[in-house]
């Protein structure tokens, strides 16, 4: 019995170690960058319907928390952009809380290089308050590969994470891949599956029990080139994962300055 | 018309039909087999192999071409040069041209803008025979009408960027009138071209073709010889957009273009304009009075295209310095600027609505294009009655502009977006998105006639129809 309790305690304690991604921006990146002279403003709204109910290591529970993230991305040229995030959390009794900010420069292989797949590389650096993440300063490098073939779309983001300040500093590089497969039912409606994981340290992969695994059936609405709309409901089957999350993304692209006629 | 002939010099012993040019359906296969069989059966018998030298010879070969010292491409081209050799013909004087296909797939050469019979027009859909790999063909036709035209391959490319209009198979065909007053001091040909195509996601959700490089006369901006001029010269610029898919704008800072002809046909009003807009396959003949000494870039006012290479330096005598490029501001183009001052109104005998729509095939695919709800080869043929005035209504219900082309005829623009016009004769017209353009066609050149969007990706995706004479 003691051994079982000890195992449970260790599992609970280990959970935050592999929860670096957080439920603030749940998105599999495509290789495209925002065009120059354009700004993309996105609102990520994520509600944890069934999540962590207790404080663990000083980190607030996620259960029934509403996370609102504002992402502003400015296109620099046809192969780079810079994104900026403002993370917030809202929960009964604690009101709206500022969680932290990230900055995310990204470069891509220009389409004119004519690679058979889309490839880009983003780097995200930021701070989040200890109340919401034990690791307060983190860095992520995210390779992105995608491809559209007919009505099918594939994207993979094998992200690597590093904690600069917090209990996971000694963990080294963490591996947090994300994958998306979708199908264009119509020009406006695509549906598919998004998978998010955090396997823990790259040099010491966590046990399945302690890994974060989330699967989101999701739809994308392509109503206009200026709008981005994504909606999904995610299930986390492992103990280290919030069990039910509802996520939505709505984005609007603003084009600035003169644009050439066709 | 009796001199128009198509004679294979060395008819192939077997004609490879299946899969050669990307026409996969059974119907296509049967059509092509019938046409090729008929051509190889009749042609040698009717036209025994002639011995005399042709007026021109074209050899289609793979060639390595230097767009700039840093940009070399390998493409199929005519006689190993880009653009192909300038063919300077005289209206009404028969011409003989030998064509040899050194490629490993069938080829065909279309004489764009010429009112010649379908068997020599260079379109397999009309019945012109293909040229088998390694084979030679002798073409004979009587050029008409005069003006700036061109010749180019007319095969299907689909997703193969080595074929069709994505290749280097194009050249200028200038048909001179029998009497040519030539009120200009110099003549300069400019052939616009985009290179290194690739598929990108378009704003409207489907794939489209974009390019990594561009050139005028086969050279990227800053490479190749500048156009050297003297103050006071009147230069005739003969401009052809040979791009597979791109519409281009052209400007020369400090100068204006006095437009003499569109698609080789003289215009009623020779209006001076600051910008020229040319859809794929469109031609503009315009005089520029060289009255702004300096060093200039004649080319795309849009920086992205100019940076890709779409420009050529114009250098006045005894002038040096950094070439000044045109600015991308207030681009304006209206065919009506060159039309009759007062539009003539003529009643058509027959009205033919042609509705352009597309069907989504996936964000990773090209749209399927349709005319009146059907894609080629299933499009309904349009019946033409000889001698009658047919009003063709191009109703574009898509978000793309379409440079539509009618083979072997010219048509008159009679209505653009609801505004009447007259007097401008063309064989290509850009139909703007979600608008209607009306043209009048006098059916006066019997035989199968192909109508299609001149964007290679659109014609490959079904945007074609055959016009048949009753």
Image (tube, coloured by chain):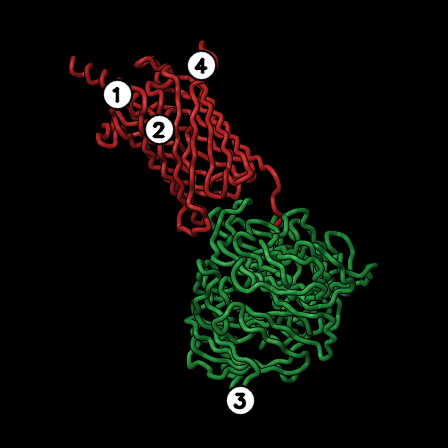
Picture disc at residue A91? 4
Evaluate if marks 4 and 3 touch, with contact meaning CB atoms under 8 Å apart: no
Q: Are marks 2 and 1 on the same chain?
A: yes
Report the residue at 64% width, 80% height from top: B142
> Percent from the top left, x then y, of residue A235?
36, 27
> Percent from the top left, x then y, of residue B207?
50, 50
- Where does label 1 land, which residue? A14
Q: Is residue B24 visible?
A: no
Q: CA distance from mark 3 to mark 1?
A: 89 Å
Q: Is residue B406 visible?
A: yes
Considering every residue shown, the one lying at the far front of the view is: B318
Q: Provide the secondary structure element on which disc 1 rests.
A: helix
Q: Is residue A132 shown left or right of residue B77?
A: left
In the picture, the quarter occupied by the N terminus of chain B is bottom right
Q: CA distance from mark 1 to mark 4?
A: 24 Å
The quadrant where residue B235 appears? bottom right
For marks 4 and 3, give the one nearer the viewer: 3
> Percent from the top left, x then y, of residue B222?
53, 58
Q: Chain of mark 1?
A: A
Q: Colour of chain A?
A: red
């Amino acid at each position: 019995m003691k051994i079982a309790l000890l195992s449970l305690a260790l599992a609970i304690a280990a959970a935050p170690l592999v929860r670096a991604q957080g439920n603030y921006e749940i998105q599999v990146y495509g290789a495209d960058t925002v065009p120059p002279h354009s700004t993309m403003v996105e609102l990520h709204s994520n509600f944890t319907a069934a999540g962590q109910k207790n404080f663990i290591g000083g980190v607030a529970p996620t259960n029934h928390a509403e996370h609102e993230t504002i992402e502003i991305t400015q296109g620099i040229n046809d192969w780079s952009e810079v994104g900026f995030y403002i993370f917030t959390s809202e929960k009964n009794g604690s009101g709206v809380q500022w969680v932290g900010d990230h900055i995310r420069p990204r470069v891509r292989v220009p389409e004119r290089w004519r690679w058979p797949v889309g490839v880009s590389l983003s780097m995200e650096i930021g701070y989040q308050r200890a109340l919401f993440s034990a690791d307060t300063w983190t860095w992520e490098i995210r390779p992105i590969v995608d491809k559209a073939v007919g009505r099918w779309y594939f994207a993979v983001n094998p992200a690597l994470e590093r904690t600069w300040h917090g209990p996971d500093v000694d963990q080294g590089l963490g591996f947090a891949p994300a994958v998306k497969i979708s199908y264009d039912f119509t020009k406006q409606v695509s549906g598919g599956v998004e998978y998010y994981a955090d396997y823990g340290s790259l040099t010491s992969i966590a046990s399945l029990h302690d890994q974060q695994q989330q699967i989101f059936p999701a739809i994308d609405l392509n109503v206009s080139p200026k709008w981005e709309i994504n909606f999904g409901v995610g299930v986390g089957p492992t103990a280290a994962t919030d069990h039910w999350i509802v996520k939505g993304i709505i984005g609007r692209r603003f084009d600035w300055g003169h644009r050439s006629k066709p | 018309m009796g001199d128009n002939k198509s004679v294979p010099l060395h008819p192939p012993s077997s004609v490879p039909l299946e899969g050669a040019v990307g026409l996969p359906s059974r119907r296509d296969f049967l059509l092509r087999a019938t046409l090729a069989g008929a051509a190889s059966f009749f042609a040698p018998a009717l036209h025994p192999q002639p011995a005399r030298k042709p007026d021109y010879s074209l050899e289609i070969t793979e060639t390595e071409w230097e767009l700039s010292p840093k940009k070399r491409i390998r493409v199929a081209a005519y006689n190993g040069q880009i653009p192909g050799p300038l063919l300077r013909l005289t209206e009404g004087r028969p011409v003989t041209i030998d064509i040899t296909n050194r490629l490993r797939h069938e080829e065909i050469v279309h004489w764009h803008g010429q009112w010649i019979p379908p068997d020599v027009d260079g379109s397999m859909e009309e019945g012109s025979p293909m040229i088998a790999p390694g084979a030679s063909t002798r073409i004979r036709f009587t050029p008409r009408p005069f003006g700036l035209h061109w010749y180019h391959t007319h095969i299907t490319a689909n997703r193969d960027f080595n074929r069709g209009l994505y290749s280097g198979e194009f050249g200028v065909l200038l048909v001179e009138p029998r009497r040519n007053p030539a009120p200009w001091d110099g003549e300069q040909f400019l052939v616009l071209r985009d290179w290194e195509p690739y598929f990108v996601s378009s704003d409207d959700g489907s794939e489209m073709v974009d390019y990594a490089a561009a050139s005028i006369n086969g050279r990227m901006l800053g490479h190749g010889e500048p156009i050297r001029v003297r103050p006071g010269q009147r230069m005739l610029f003969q401009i052809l957009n040979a791009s597979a898919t791109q519409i281009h704008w052209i400007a020369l800072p400090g100068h204006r273009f006095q437009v003499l002809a569109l698609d080789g046909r003289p215009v009623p009003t020779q209006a001076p304009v600051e910008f020229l807009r040319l859809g794929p396959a469109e031609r503009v003949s315009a005089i520029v009075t060289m009255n702004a000494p300096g060093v200039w870039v004649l080319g795309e006012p849009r920086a992205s295209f100019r940076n890709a290479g779409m420009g050529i330096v114009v250098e006045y005598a005894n002038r040096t310095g950094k070439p000044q490029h045109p600015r991308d501001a207030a681009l304006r183009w209206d065919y009506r600027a060159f039309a009759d001052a007062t539009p003539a109104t003529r009643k058509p005998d027959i009205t033919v609505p042609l509705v352009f729509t597309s069907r989504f095939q996936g964000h990773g695919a090209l749209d399927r294009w349709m005319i009146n709800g059907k894609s080629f080869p299933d499009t309904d043929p349009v019946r033409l009655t000889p001698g009658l005035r047919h009003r063709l209504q191009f109703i574009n219900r898509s978000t793309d502009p379409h440079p539509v082309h009618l083979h072997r005829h010219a048509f008159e623009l009679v209505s653009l977006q609801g505004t009447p016009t007259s007097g401008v004769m063309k064989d290509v017209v850009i139909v703007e998105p979600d608008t209607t353009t009306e043209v009048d066609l006098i059916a006066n050149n019997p035989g199968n006639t192909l109508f299609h969007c001149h964007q290679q990706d659109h014609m490959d995706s079904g945007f074609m129809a055959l016009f048949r004479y009753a």
